[in-house]
Image (cartoon, grey):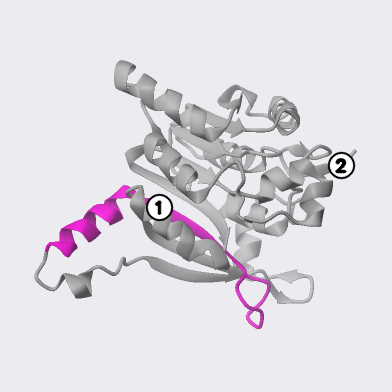
């Protein structure tokens, strides 16, 4: 049995298509939580690690408005394991699992919202599948294939689902390889979502960036559309966003100061 132990909770990952890695931990730590964050959605929760990290951060606040964290998962096996991890955590009352494709979840949610004024999510997070073609590994491991390949969740489907689920002032946070960022931004723009922040993640200052944590919002797209109506639209169509870099290590097996600050509330080594 594979169990990843953290300071305040443990994550069983025996059935998970994707095991917990440093990138997913950093992504979970980077997602901003404040006392006004009420409703959180985790798309493709897997082990539930991202949802559990947000629950810990939210309940650590002096005044938290957290009402619910909904975790949507397509595969039955992963959902069962995530539910077990939720139930064994200190925040089980705030965590719900839904076994469903996000396309169907968002469709039903949108229909419910139109008829019952259902409130959307003010924070959506996702570490989506991004490979298009199958590999030998994915064929040998169907759960890993589902977690890594976009057969069942294209960027267009994901962005359209986020559009249906996100509140007007909400933020969507995603972890993507740099090779997929441009393609995803095109799909996001078509869905009315603009990039507002990008945090590149690299092993060290000497290593190239392979993944990045991205933040999308509606208001940036509104600003772009407004600027596009100006006479100098050719110059103003460029979307402005914050761009930073996070290096994991400052020397072999020694986290950088920024990474240590991010992970110190979670990893056992920092107790």
From what the image shows, is residue 234 above or below residue 172?
below
Residue drawn 57% across and 58% down? Answer: 176
Question: Observer-nearest residue: 164 or 186?
Answer: 186
Residue at the limit of the structure toward the top, as seen here = 116
Q: Position of residue 266 (x, y in %)?
A: 68, 49
Write down the region rendered in magenta.
Answer: 202-229
Residue drawn 62% across and 50% down? Answer: 129
Is the N terminus in the top left, top right, bottom left or bottom right quadrant? top right
List the residue tagged with mark 2: 2
Numbered disc in front, either 2 or 1 = 1
Q: Is label 1 in a helix, a strand or a loop?
A: helix
Assess disc 1: are there few (<14), some (14-19) or many (≥20) residues with their C-alpha within 10 Å of its C-alpha.
many
Mark with earlier residue (2, 1): 2
- Residue 215 visible in rendering: yes
Residue 223 belongs to the span the image colors magenta: yes
Alpha carbon separation for disc pair 2 and 1: 36 Å
Residue drawn 50% across and 40% down? Answer: 61
Assess disc 2: are there few (<14), some (14-19) or many (≥20) residues with their C-alpha within 10 Å of its C-alpha.
few
From what the image shows, is residue 251 above or below residue 125?
below
Residue 174 belongs to the span the image colors magenta: no
Q: Position of residue 48 (x, y in %)?
A: 66, 37
Q: Position of residue 50 (x, y in %)?
A: 62, 43
Question: Observer-nearest residue: 156 or 233?
Answer: 156
List the residue tagged with mark 1: 188
Q: Is label 2 in a helix, a strand or a loop?
A: loop
- Residue 17 visible in rendering: no
From what the image shows, is residue 71 above or below residue 129?
above
Quarter of the image where one finds residue 231? bottom left
Q: Position of residue 237 (x, y in %)?
A: 24, 68
In the rendering, which numbered label is found on residue 198?
Answer: none
């Amino acid at each position: 049995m594979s169990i990843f132990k953290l300071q305040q909770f443990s994550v069983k990952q025996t059935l998970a298509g994707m095991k917990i890695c440093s990138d997913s931990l950093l992504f979970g730590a980077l997602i901003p939580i404040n006392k006004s964050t009420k409703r959180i959605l985790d798309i493709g929760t897997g082990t539930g690690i991202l949802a559990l990290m947000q629950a810990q951060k939210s309940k650590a606040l002096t005044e938290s408005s957290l009402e619910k964290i909904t975790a949507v998962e397509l595969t039955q096996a992963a959902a069962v394991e995530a539910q077990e991890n939720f139930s064994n955590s200190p925040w089980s009352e705030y965590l719900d699992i839904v076994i469903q494709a996000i396309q169907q979840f968002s469709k039903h949610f949108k229909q419910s919202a139109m008829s019952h004024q259902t409130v959307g999510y003010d924070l959506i997070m996702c570490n989506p599948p991004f490979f298009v073609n199958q590999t030998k590994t994915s064929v040998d491991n169907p759960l890993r294939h589902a977690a890594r390949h976009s057969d069942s969740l294209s960027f267009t489907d994901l962005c359209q689902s986020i559009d249906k689920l996100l509140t007007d002032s909400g933020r969507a946070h995603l972890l993507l390889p740099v090779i997929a960022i441009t393609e995803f931004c095109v799909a996001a723009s078509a869905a009315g979502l603009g990039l507002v922040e990008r945090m590149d993640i690299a092993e060290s200052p000497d290593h190239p960036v392979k993944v990045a944590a991205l933040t999308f919002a509606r208001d940036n797209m509104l600003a772009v559309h407004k600027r596009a109506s100006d006479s100098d639209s050719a110059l103003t169509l460029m979307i402005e966003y914050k761009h930073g870099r996070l290096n994991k290590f400052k020397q072999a097996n020694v986290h950088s100061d920024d990474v240590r600050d991010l992970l110190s509330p979670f990893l056992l080594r920092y107790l």
